[in-house]
Amino acid sequence: MHIAALKERAAGEKRVSVTPETVKKFIALGASVAVETGAGEAASISDADYKAAGAKVGPADKTVAGASIILGVQAPDVDTLKGASNGAWVAATFDPFGRKDRVEAYAKAGLEALSMEFMPRITRAQSMDVLSSQSNLAGYKAVIASADTYGRAFPMMMTAAGTIQAAKVFVMGVGVAGLQAIATAKRLGAQVSATDVRSATREQIQSLGAKPVFVEDVAGIEGEGSGGYATEMSEEYQKAQAELVSSHIAKQDIVITTALIPGRAAPRLISDAQIASMKPGSVIFDLAVAQGGNVEGSAPDTLVEKHGVTIMGYSNTPAHLPADASALFARNLYNFLSAFWDKEAGKPILDEEIGDAVRLTQGGEVVNDRLA
Ligand code: NAD
């Protein structure tokens, strides 16, 4: 069983799908591992580190030659995978709804695409879930980047020259990223409040010492669909939410938005009028900017100034913490493949629950129900 990992080719992608730690672990399972020259450079992992762990390091074509499993952070283009075994697996993120062309190309090439975004949200798959591991770091980074851009301090400070007030931070969307954003802002000494459409998050917000801000008394506010994901909300709810947010947001210094709905554009949470109601010098970090944005006028990797408010957001937030993001991503991939490792076969054999969820292509066809 030969496992290969290529250098990521997408612009701005600094992560890598394998680390010396997971190289050793794959070898301990009986696999051989090859890594493309320079694959870990942007994540502070040298070729020598990979070699010391037991990997072969070389050019892309040699790395892929004969591979039965190819690992990636973002799925590589099929033309970089020539020479892989027939029906080789590629375990990576595929952006399956956004990049249907790539999924088709994988089917055509006879490759088996395993989309890590489609990992089911079940307890035993938690350690395999790249969305969680990367969102957690993204939530942290959003707060750190906002604090850096903000022209004031986060904690209250009582000094001989007078008192500085604590910053008010409002987190919209309390999934994995939002929870980490709340925790990070609290650690920095901010006064934190948060909101979500899923009522189950109210307790989670309180348990982190933040104040929940919720729409009350509107029909259909449970907001939770399958797998713990949010559903799209009724018009009545959206109106009530907008009113609530308007009155709250005007008093905030920092707003972090994280709201996503799988397979759809990110919901619009903050309008231009609401931005105008904020104090000059406030900062909004739109973590959903790459999925269409929660904030009117936000643009990826650009500092947008509107009404004296800075709106920011990265197209790839985890890539701003490439070393930790790679370490966790690589462990997710290892946890996934090793959980199904069949000693006799010397390779992983997926079960139905997880296999059918993540498999996009097989035997030349697109086979995933969610893409039908
Ligand atoms: P996500 O990235 O899909 O969305 C981020 C948050 O935005 C969610 O909390 C969502 O409810 C919220 N949101 C959506 N529309 C909104 C709106 N209009 N206004 C305000 N908020 C809105 O979510 P996520 O981080 O992936 O987590 C969702 C849930 O799934 C969490 O409870 C998480 O703990 C759970 N989860 C479970 C597993 C597992 O068991 N394996 C893995 C990952 C996440």
Image (cartoon, rainbow, N blue to C red):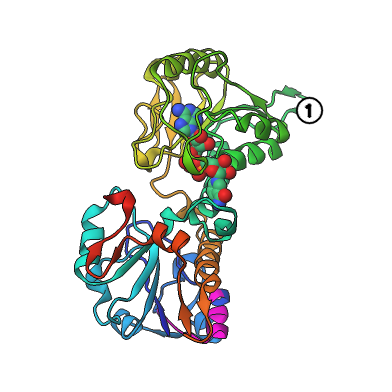
- Quadrant position of residue 5: bottom left
> Among all residues in the image, which is located at the extreme front?
352
In the picture, measured across the screen, residue 182 lies left or right of residue 225, that is: right
**Residue sitting at x 30%, y 48%:** 97
Position of residue 216 measured from the top left corner of the image (x, y, whole percent):
57, 15
The kind of secondary structure element at disc 1 is strand
- Residue in the foreground of this view, choosing between 152 and 23: 23
Q: Is residue 124 above or below residue 280?
A: below
For disc 1, the neighbor class at 10 Å (few under 14, some 14 to 19, many from 20) is few
**Residue sitting at x 55%, y 52%:** 122
- Quadrant position of residue 86: bottom left
What are the residue bounds of the magenta stretch?
22-35
**Residue sitting at x 40%, y 15%:** 273
Q: Is residue 64 above or below residue 143?
A: below
Which kind of residue does numbered mark 1 sit on?
Answer: Thr
* Residue 198 is inside the magenta segment: no
**What quarter of the picture does the N terminus occupy?**
bottom left
